[in-house]
Amino acid sequence: MTAGSAAAPVAVITGGAQGIGGAAAALLAARGWTVHALDLRDSPEAAVLSHRCDVTDGAALAALAGEIGPIDALICSAGINLRPRDNSPERLELAAWQKTLDVNLTGTMLTVRAFRPSIRPEGAIVTLGSVAALRAMPWADAYTASKGALVALTRSWAVDYSRDGIRVNCVCPGPVDTGMMAGMIEQHAGAQQLQLPQQRMARPAEVAELIAFLVSPGSSYISGTVIPVDGAATAHSAGMPFPRRRVPGGQAAG
Ligand SMILES: NC(=O)c1ccc[n+]([C@@H]2O[C@H](COP(=O)([O-])OP(=O)(O)OC[C@H]3O[C@@H](n4cnc5c(N)ncnc54)[C@H](O)[C@@H]3O)[C@@H](O)[C@H]2O)c1
């Protein structure tokens, strides 16, 4: 394992071994941060310090907070989507509801509770919401509930922690090409049927860029915001067709 210099800013990223959290970990490490990934698995990145940790385990989080010491950024990306067990109310499995809330909502709360005292003044917290918290997402009752609550909590924390100079923002991705979305393209027989204005999912690195900005000094007056990274999906009026995307050479994509 390698880490940044003693003067390097320090980030803790839950779910930092893969997907959006993994992309944020790699980006911040490349920019000179010391990055600690807390996840059920190890990060494949040599420049990232891996800690096996379940975000539903408050005692383990508290122990790691003590071990890691002062930090500058806390990024809460650990999350699950238990599709199709998380389904319409009449078919939703109660165990899936409970597990989803345990990881996505309570896990984020426990993470913030454990690490907030370690965040230096002028530090930042980023939570991972979802467009599911902003617009209706079919067949995802527990996931939607967990992300809606996270949006509300983010605003609440942003006000509460302002006295310590800590900023808190929520990034709400649309569909991102990660393990969580594996099989979705195939299931919908082509990106066009995902009904996305860009006619593709986001790349994890495109979400990581916003996360990196939100923990940087450049965003020093940005707090309490809920920012979609969705290629205009939530800006679109339901029922209206998408224009075919222009690509170089004059042919439409998708
Ligand atoms: N992929 C998408 O389309 C999308 C869209 C909107 C929001 N999000 C949110 O972004 C976040 C990251 O999603 P992703 O697409 O990168 O998912 P992913 O499945 O690729 O990665 C999630 C990571 O979280 C870890 N994790 C899961 N449960 C954990 C636990 N209990 N303790 C510790 N680590 C745990 C996993 O091991 C994994 O490394 C999630 O909160 C997700 O809800 C994703």
Image (cartoon, rainbow, N blue to C red):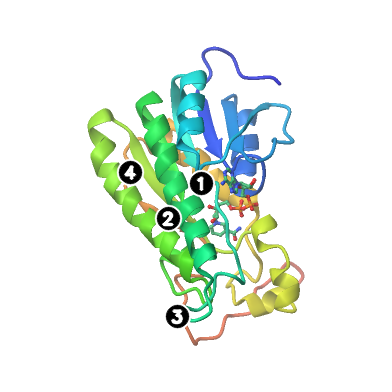
Considering depth in this image, is 94 or 205 the residue closer to the camera? 94
The CA span between labels 2 and 1 is 9 Å
From the image, tell me which residue sits under label 1: 210
Q: Residues within 10 Å of mark 3 (few under 14, many from 20)?
A: few
Whether the residues at callouts 2 and 4 have beta carbons within 8 Å, the answer is no
Q: Nearer the viewer, residue 247 or 104?
A: 104
Please tell me which residue lies in front, 89 or 232: 89
* Residue behind mark 4: 223
Which label sits on residue 61?
A: none
C-alpha distance separating marks 2 and 4 = 11 Å
**Residue drawn 70% across and 78% down?**
188
Q: Which residue is mark 3?
A: 237
Callout 2 touching callout 1 (CB < 8 Å): yes
- Whether residue 254 appears in this view of the structure is no
Q: Residue at x 65, y 74 (%)?
A: 245
Residue 101 position in % (x across, y down): 46, 57
Looking at the picture, which amino acid does disc 3 mark?
Ser
Mark 2: which amino acid?
Ile
Circle 2 residues within 10 Å: few <14, some 14–19, many ≥20: some
Residue at 51% from the left image edge and 14% from the top image edge:
7
Horizontal side of 53 relative to 101 (left or right) equals right
Q: Earlier in the sequence, mark 2 or mark 1?
A: 1
User: Which of the two labelled residues, at mark 4 and mark 1, occupies the earlier sequence position?
Assistant: 1
Q: Label 2, on which residue? A: 227
